[in-house]
Amino acid sequence: MRRKLIAGNWKMHGNLVDNEALLHGILAGMGDVKAGVAVSVPFPYLAQVKAKLAGSRIAWGAQNVSQHAKGAYTGEISAAMLNDFECKYVIVGHSERRAVYGESDQLVAEKYAAAQTAGLVPILCVGETLEERESGVTEAVVARQIDAVLAKSGVISLANAVIAYEPVWAIGTGRTASPEQAQAVHAFIRGKIRGLDADVANNLVIQYGGSVKGANAAELFVQPDIDGGLIGGASLSAEEFLAICRAG
Ligand code: 13P
Protein backbone atom coordinates (compact mmCIF):
# COMPACT_ATOMS: atom_id res chain seq x y z
CA MET A 1 0.00 0.00 0.00
CA ARG A 2 1.49 3.32 -1.07
CA ARG A 3 1.32 6.15 1.44
CA LYS A 4 -0.13 9.39 0.16
CA LEU A 5 2.22 12.35 -0.09
CA ILE A 6 0.90 15.89 -0.05
CA ALA A 7 3.50 18.50 -0.99
CA GLY A 8 2.98 22.24 -0.98
CA ASN A 9 4.72 24.25 -3.70
CA TRP A 10 4.83 27.82 -2.51
CA LYS A 11 6.22 29.00 -5.87
CA MET A 12 7.55 32.61 -5.57
CA HIS A 13 5.42 33.55 -2.58
CA GLY A 14 6.06 34.25 1.06
CA ASN A 15 8.15 36.36 3.40
CA LEU A 16 9.68 35.67 6.80
CA VAL A 17 6.68 36.94 8.74
CA ASP A 18 3.95 35.25 6.69
CA ASN A 19 5.91 31.99 6.49
CA GLU A 20 6.19 31.86 10.26
CA ALA A 21 2.42 32.10 10.64
CA LEU A 22 1.73 29.64 7.83
CA LEU A 23 4.13 27.01 9.20
CA HIS A 24 2.78 27.51 12.70
CA GLY A 25 -0.76 27.00 11.46
CA ILE A 26 0.10 23.85 9.52
CA LEU A 27 2.06 22.34 12.41
CA ALA A 28 -0.81 23.03 14.81
CA GLY A 29 -3.25 21.09 12.63
CA MET A 30 -1.16 18.01 11.84
CA GLY A 31 -2.66 15.89 14.61
CA ASP A 32 -5.25 14.16 12.42
CA VAL A 33 -3.21 14.00 9.20
CA LYS A 34 -2.20 10.50 8.12
CA ALA A 35 -0.50 11.32 4.82
CA GLY A 36 3.11 12.30 4.40
CA VAL A 37 3.44 16.09 4.15
CA ALA A 38 6.13 18.32 2.67
CA VAL A 39 6.60 21.93 1.63
CA SER A 40 8.80 23.21 -1.23
CA VAL A 41 9.81 26.77 -0.57
CA PRO A 42 11.89 29.52 -2.22
CA PHE A 43 15.63 29.10 -1.55
CA PRO A 44 15.97 32.05 0.87
CA TYR A 45 13.47 30.44 3.25
CA LEU A 46 15.10 27.02 3.50
CA ALA A 47 16.87 27.99 6.73
CA GLN A 48 13.57 29.18 8.16
CA VAL A 49 11.65 26.02 7.30
CA LYS A 50 14.50 23.85 8.54
CA ALA A 51 14.48 25.65 11.90
CA LYS A 52 10.71 25.52 12.15
CA LEU A 53 10.06 21.98 10.87
CA ALA A 54 13.06 20.00 12.17
CA GLY A 55 11.74 17.22 14.39
CA SER A 56 8.20 17.55 13.02
CA ARG A 57 6.39 15.20 10.62
CA ILE A 58 6.68 17.72 7.79
CA ALA A 59 9.56 17.40 5.32
CA TRP A 60 10.83 20.26 3.19
CA GLY A 61 12.51 20.91 -0.08
CA ALA A 62 13.30 23.31 -2.89
CA GLN A 63 11.64 24.11 -6.19
CA ASN A 64 14.62 23.89 -8.52
CA VAL A 65 18.25 22.76 -8.58
CA SER A 66 21.25 23.15 -10.85
CA GLN A 67 22.27 20.25 -13.04
CA HIS A 68 25.88 21.05 -12.11
CA ALA A 69 27.61 19.96 -8.90
CA LYS A 70 29.62 23.18 -8.52
CA GLY A 71 31.45 25.81 -10.51
CA ALA A 72 31.13 29.11 -12.31
CA TYR A 73 27.33 29.19 -12.63
CA THR A 74 26.33 32.56 -11.22
CA GLY A 75 22.92 32.52 -9.61
CA GLU A 76 22.55 28.75 -9.54
CA ILE A 77 21.99 26.50 -6.50
CA SER A 78 23.54 23.02 -6.31
CA ALA A 79 22.03 19.89 -4.82
CA ALA A 80 24.83 19.82 -2.22
CA MET A 81 23.74 23.27 -1.07
CA LEU A 82 20.21 21.97 -0.62
CA ASN A 83 21.65 19.20 1.52
CA ASP A 84 23.15 21.85 3.81
CA PHE A 85 19.55 22.78 4.62
CA GLU A 86 18.51 19.14 5.04
CA CYS A 87 16.08 19.22 2.15
CA LYS A 88 14.44 15.90 1.45
CA TYR A 89 12.77 16.83 -1.84
CA VAL A 90 13.40 19.04 -4.83
CA ILE A 91 10.92 19.73 -7.61
CA VAL A 92 12.39 19.31 -11.10
CA GLY A 93 10.76 20.09 -14.41
CA HIS A 94 7.84 22.10 -13.11
CA SER A 95 5.85 23.33 -16.09
CA GLU A 96 6.66 26.93 -15.15
CA ARG A 97 10.39 26.09 -15.44
CA ARG A 98 9.79 24.33 -18.74
CA ALA A 99 7.61 27.08 -20.22
CA VAL A 100 9.06 30.28 -18.76
CA TYR A 101 12.73 29.28 -18.51
CA GLY A 102 12.90 26.97 -21.49
CA GLU A 103 13.97 23.87 -19.57
CA SER A 104 14.14 20.95 -21.98
CA ASP A 105 13.39 17.31 -21.18
CA GLN A 106 17.14 16.71 -21.34
CA LEU A 107 17.95 19.47 -18.86
CA VAL A 108 15.24 18.26 -16.50
CA ALA A 109 16.72 14.76 -16.69
CA GLU A 110 20.13 16.20 -15.77
CA LYS A 111 18.65 18.06 -12.80
CA TYR A 112 16.86 14.90 -11.68
CA ALA A 113 20.16 12.99 -11.83
CA ALA A 114 22.04 15.73 -9.97
CA ALA A 115 19.42 15.70 -7.21
CA GLN A 116 19.60 11.93 -6.81
CA THR A 117 23.40 11.90 -6.84
CA ALA A 118 23.26 14.19 -3.81
CA GLY A 119 20.69 11.98 -2.08
CA LEU A 120 17.69 14.22 -2.64
CA VAL A 121 14.32 12.84 -3.75
CA PRO A 122 13.32 14.55 -7.00
CA ILE A 123 9.67 15.34 -7.61
CA LEU A 124 9.56 15.07 -11.40
CA CYS A 125 6.75 17.14 -12.88
CA VAL A 126 5.19 16.08 -16.16
CA GLY A 127 2.07 17.18 -17.98
CA GLU A 128 0.57 18.39 -21.21
CA THR A 129 -0.65 21.79 -22.34
CA LEU A 130 -4.29 22.35 -23.31
CA GLU A 131 -3.32 22.36 -26.96
CA GLU A 132 -1.56 19.02 -26.56
CA ARG A 133 -4.54 17.50 -24.76
CA GLU A 134 -6.93 18.73 -27.42
CA SER A 135 -4.78 17.30 -30.16
CA GLY A 136 -4.74 13.92 -28.45
CA VAL A 137 -1.05 13.71 -27.57
CA THR A 138 -1.27 13.78 -23.76
CA GLU A 139 0.21 10.30 -23.33
CA ALA A 140 2.92 10.92 -25.92
CA VAL A 141 4.00 14.13 -24.16
CA VAL A 142 4.07 12.56 -20.70
CA ALA A 143 5.91 9.51 -22.07
CA ARG A 144 8.51 11.73 -23.75
CA GLN A 145 9.09 13.68 -20.52
CA ILE A 146 9.55 10.47 -18.52
CA ASP A 147 11.65 8.78 -21.20
CA ALA A 148 14.30 11.50 -20.92
CA VAL A 149 14.74 10.59 -17.25
CA LEU A 150 14.65 6.85 -17.93
CA ALA A 151 17.33 7.22 -20.60
CA LYS A 152 19.65 9.07 -18.24
CA SER A 153 18.98 7.44 -14.86
CA GLY A 154 17.16 4.16 -15.57
CA VAL A 155 13.88 2.83 -14.19
CA ILE A 156 15.45 1.89 -10.85
CA SER A 157 16.00 5.59 -10.17
CA LEU A 158 12.23 5.89 -9.76
CA ALA A 159 12.54 3.85 -6.56
CA ASN A 160 13.81 7.09 -4.99
CA ALA A 161 11.67 9.64 -6.78
CA VAL A 162 8.15 11.01 -7.00
CA ILE A 163 6.32 11.83 -10.21
CA ALA A 164 3.82 14.68 -10.21
CA TYR A 165 1.33 14.73 -13.06
CA GLU A 166 0.40 18.38 -13.51
CA PRO A 167 -1.66 19.17 -16.60
CA VAL A 168 -0.56 22.67 -17.53
CA TRP A 169 -4.14 23.77 -18.23
CA ALA A 170 -5.11 22.93 -14.64
CA ILE A 171 -2.31 24.85 -12.91
CA GLY A 172 -3.50 28.02 -11.22
CA THR A 173 -6.61 28.11 -13.40
CA GLY A 174 -9.20 26.78 -11.00
CA ARG A 175 -9.90 24.15 -13.65
CA THR A 176 -8.99 20.85 -12.00
CA ALA A 177 -8.67 17.71 -14.09
CA SER A 178 -11.65 15.49 -13.34
CA PRO A 179 -10.79 12.49 -11.18
CA GLU A 180 -11.33 10.29 -14.26
CA GLN A 181 -9.06 12.41 -16.47
CA ALA A 182 -6.31 12.43 -13.86
CA GLN A 183 -6.65 8.73 -13.04
CA ALA A 184 -6.36 7.84 -16.73
CA VAL A 185 -3.00 9.59 -17.05
CA HIS A 186 -1.76 8.25 -13.71
CA ALA A 187 -2.66 4.72 -14.80
CA PHE A 188 -0.85 5.30 -18.08
CA ILE A 189 2.28 6.44 -16.23
CA ARG A 190 2.21 3.50 -13.80
CA GLY A 191 1.54 1.07 -16.64
CA LYS A 192 4.48 2.43 -18.59
CA ILE A 193 6.79 1.95 -15.60
CA ARG A 194 5.28 -1.46 -14.82
CA GLY A 195 6.40 -2.59 -18.25
CA LEU A 196 9.97 -1.98 -17.10
CA ASP A 197 9.88 -2.90 -13.39
CA ALA A 198 6.72 -4.02 -11.58
CA ASP A 199 8.05 -3.39 -8.06
CA VAL A 200 9.16 0.13 -8.89
CA ALA A 201 5.78 0.82 -10.51
CA ASN A 202 3.79 -0.52 -7.57
CA ASN A 203 5.73 1.58 -5.06
CA LEU A 204 5.97 4.75 -7.15
CA VAL A 205 4.19 7.75 -5.67
CA ILE A 206 2.42 9.64 -8.47
CA GLN A 207 0.98 12.94 -7.28
CA TYR A 208 -1.64 15.00 -9.06
CA GLY A 209 -1.21 18.76 -9.26
CA GLY A 210 -3.42 21.49 -10.69
CA SER A 211 -6.03 23.50 -8.78
CA VAL A 212 -6.32 20.99 -5.93
CA LYS A 213 -8.38 22.42 -3.04
CA GLY A 214 -9.90 21.11 0.14
CA ALA A 215 -13.18 20.70 -1.72
CA ASN A 216 -11.88 18.47 -4.54
CA ALA A 217 -8.93 16.67 -2.93
CA ALA A 218 -10.81 13.61 -1.64
CA GLU A 219 -12.36 12.65 -4.98
CA LEU A 220 -8.93 12.85 -6.62
CA PHE A 221 -7.03 11.02 -3.89
CA VAL A 222 -9.49 8.13 -3.82
CA GLN A 223 -8.47 7.18 -7.36
CA PRO A 224 -6.35 4.01 -7.37
CA ASP A 225 -3.29 5.55 -9.04
CA ILE A 226 -3.38 9.02 -7.45
CA ASP A 227 -1.05 9.03 -4.46
CA GLY A 228 -1.56 12.54 -3.17
CA GLY A 229 -0.97 15.97 -4.59
CA LEU A 230 1.43 18.77 -5.41
CA ILE A 231 -0.38 21.86 -4.21
CA GLY A 232 0.26 25.40 -5.39
CA GLY A 233 -2.11 28.20 -4.41
CA ALA A 234 -3.95 26.23 -1.74
CA SER A 235 -0.69 25.50 0.10
CA LEU A 236 -0.43 29.18 1.05
CA SER A 237 -3.38 28.85 3.45
CA ALA A 238 -2.85 26.63 6.49
CA GLU A 239 -6.55 25.84 6.73
CA GLU A 240 -6.89 24.92 3.04
CA PHE A 241 -3.62 22.97 2.93
CA LEU A 242 -4.59 21.01 6.05
CA ALA A 243 -7.99 20.19 4.53
CA ILE A 244 -6.13 18.70 1.55
CA CYS A 245 -3.70 16.86 3.83
CA ARG A 246 -6.60 15.35 5.76
CA ALA A 247 -8.08 14.04 2.51
CA GLY A 248 -4.85 12.10 1.89
P1 13P B 1 -2.09 25.24 -8.24
O1 13P B 1 -2.43 24.28 -7.13
O2 13P B 1 -2.01 26.65 -7.80
O3 13P B 1 -2.96 25.01 -9.46
O4 13P B 1 -0.59 24.86 -8.70
C1 13P B 1 -0.27 23.55 -8.96
C2 13P B 1 1.20 23.47 -9.11
O5 13P B 1 1.77 23.95 -10.06
C3 13P B 1 1.95 22.80 -8.04
O6 13P B 1 3.27 22.58 -8.42
Image (spheres, rainbow, N blue to C red):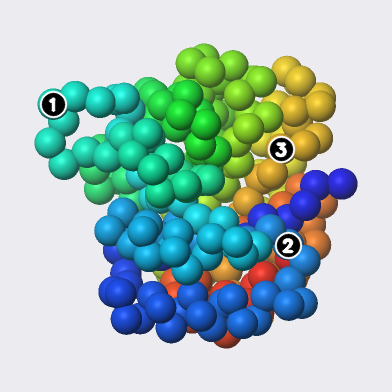
The reply to whether residue 133 is in sight is no
- The image position of residue 99, as x and y in percent, is 30, 45
133 vs 117, nearest the viewer: 117
Residue occupying the point 24% across, 43% down: 101
Residue occupying the point 50% across, 55% down: 60
Quick check: 28 above or below 98?
below
Quick check: 147 above or below 44?
above
Q: Using the rendered view, name the quadrant where residue 169 is placed.
A: bottom left
| Quarter that holds the C terminus | bottom right
Nearer-N-terminus badge (1/3) = 1
Nearest to the eye among marks 3 and 2: give it: 2
Q: Amino acid at mark 1?
A: Ala
Classed neighbour count for the residue bearing mark 1: other residues with Cα under 10 Å, few (<14), some (14–19), many (≥20): few
Quick check: 109 above or below 99?
above
Which residue is under mark 2? Answer: 35
The residues bearing labels 1 and 3 have C-alpha atoms spaced at a distance of: 35 Å
Q: Using the rendered view, name the quadrant where residue 219 is placed.
A: bottom right
Q: Using the rendered view, name the quadrant where residue 190 is placed.
A: top right
Which residue is under mark 3? Answer: 204
Q: Amino acid at mark 2?
A: Ala
Nearer-N-terminus badge (3/2) = 2
Quick check: 125 above or below 232?
above
Classed neighbour count for the residue bearing mark 3: other residues with Cα under 10 Å, few (<14), some (14–19), many (≥20): many
Q: What mark, if any, has residue 123 been given in the picture?
A: none
181 vs 17, nearest the viewer: 17
Nearer-N-terminus badge (1/2) = 2
- The image position of residue 96, as x and y in percent, is 34, 51
Q: Are marks 3 and 2 in contact (CB under 8 Å)?
A: no
Q: What mark, if any, has residue 72 been given in the picture?
A: 1
Nearest to the eye among marks 1 and 2: give it: 1
Q: Are marks 1 and 3 in contact (CB under 8 Å)?
A: no
